[in-house]
Image: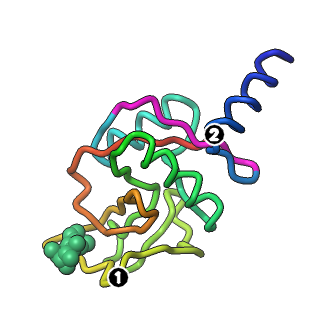
Amino acid sequence: MYCASVFSLVWIFINGNSAGEKTFQANGSEGDFETSKATCSQAGGLLASPRNSAENTAIQQIVVRHNKAAYVGINDIETEGSFKYLSGEAIGYSNWAGGEPNNLGTEDCVEIHSDGKWNDRSCNEKRLIICEF
Ligand code: GMH
Ligand code: CA
């Protein structure tokens, strides 16, 4: 237990993916929004849901490391234009790219790019799975 904790802290320090109480992890696997959500939940976590700029930066670093955009745990599936966390709570922080969200066609999910900016996107693309624990 002690060694595992020390290892985690060193790993998190080196990889720079910690923000406050959360740790963010990816293993390179990809999935659409539902698969990403289910994968994180099966691992005992949650699809990464940035609630402030420190968390957003930690997630962004993982996107950069894998060179692949990721879904975040935010969507407006229930009510168009009303973006919520997976808990159903309205988002309290956002980092939209210029001109987003534009709901092009129908875009109810949110992807984070290597610049850390968000784009509303179809829930059916394949994206890097990043979980928070
Ligand atoms: C349009 C344009 C792009 C933008 C995409 C994106 C799709 O094609 O506004 O600049 O990147 O939409 O919002 O999700
Ligand atoms: Ca969009």
Q: Is residue 91 visible?
A: yes
Residue 101 x %, y %: 32, 78
> Which labelled disc corresponds to residue 98?
1
Identify which residue is drawn at 33% across, 68% down: 119
> Which labelled disc corresponds to residue 10?
none
Q: Looking at this rendering, what residue extends furthest in the bottom direction?
A: 99
Residue 75 x %, y %: 39, 64
Report the magenta residues as a range.
21-29
As helix, strand or loop, the secondary structure at mark 2 comes to loop
Q: Which amino acid does label 2 sit on?
A: Phe
List the residue tagged with mark 2: 133
- The quadrant of the picture occupied by the C terminus is top right
Identify which residue is drawn at 86% across, 17% down: 2
Estimate how packed mark 2 is, as few (under 14), some (14 to 19) or many (20 or more) residues with alpha carbons within 10 Å.
some
Q: Distance between the residues labelled 1 and 2?
A: 30 Å
The answer to whether residue 129 is left or right of residue 127 is right
